[in-house]
Amino acid sequence: MCGRYTLTNSTNLEQRFRVSQAVLPLGARYNVAPTQEMPVVVQAQEGGNRLEIMKWGLIPFWSKEPKAGYSTINARAEGLESKPAYRKPVRSQRCIVPADGFYEWQKSNGSKVPFFIHLKGGEVFGMAGLYDLYKLPDGDWLKTYTIVTTEANELMQQVHDRMPVILPKEAEDEWLDRSVTDPFQVIRWLKPYPAEEMELYPVSKQVNSPSNDLPELVKTINSA
């Protein structure tokens, strides 16, 4: 799964994801948690890509109330096209969640040790996401998203049996393309990212609290 992630350098999002509008300055985030608002990349109606600020934790448009459950911060890739909450988004409301790392917890001696996982080069990558729009009583729209997960690669298996889907760059355009409405055309990309291109290491348990959002959270520590 993916319950926390980072976006510590957002200065190149416009170029990295070919976003057509000017990107507003975004502060470094070292501990993004569910229910918080973060930028995601979508295909604009007029064409091209744009950034939208959305809340993490998908609320289906048909929900009785605008409250996301913990179960909707992630969407399992397996059977995605048949699940009620994701059946519509996977066909026409796909997004990319920019990140440069994420956290996962490993069970060890009766406790959980947090690990930070990122690409070896430290660059920003795109996680496969889905979004939905919920119409509030006042007529405004609440925009929410979820991160798609898949089985862990060989590296991640040391820590957990799931990981977020990191899209290869060649898949990003198709994933965002609103004209692609057949889910079976895009779900082929929902597989583990190559383990040899990633690295992980243990970090401080300070990351357990969403109120902590500091550079120290991504520094390696001795897990002994």
Image: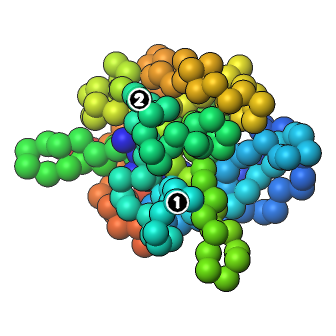
Residue drawn at (40%, 36%), measured in percent from left and top?
Answer: 76
Locate residue 100 relative to residue 217 in the image: left or right: right
- Identify which amino acid the numbered label 2 is placed on: Gly
Against 181, is 218 above or below?
A: below
Instruction: Answer few, some or many: residues within 10 Å of disc 2's Cα (few below 14, many 20 plus, some between 14 and 19).
Output: few
- Identify which amino acid the numbered label 1 is placed on: Trp
| Residue 8 in sight from this viewpoint | no
| Residue 139 in sight from this viewpoint | yes
Against 100, is 172 above or below?
A: above
Mark 2 to mark 1: distance in Å? 20 Å
- The circle on residue 89 is none
Residue 24 image position (x, y, % from top left): 81, 62
Residue 105 image position (x, y, % from top left): 28, 45
Task: Tell me the quadrant of the picture where the N terminus can be found.
Answer: top left
Residue 87 image position (x, y, % from top left): 52, 40
Q: Are marks 2 and 1 in contact (CB under 8 Å)?
A: no
Q: Nearer the viewer, mark 2 or mark 1?
A: 1
The residue wearing badge 2 is: 79
Instruction: Answer few, some or many: residues within 10 Å of disc 1's Cα (few below 14, many 20 plus, some between 14 and 19).
Output: few
Name the foreground residue: 190 vs 80.
Answer: 80
Name the foreground residue: 195 vs 163.
Answer: 163
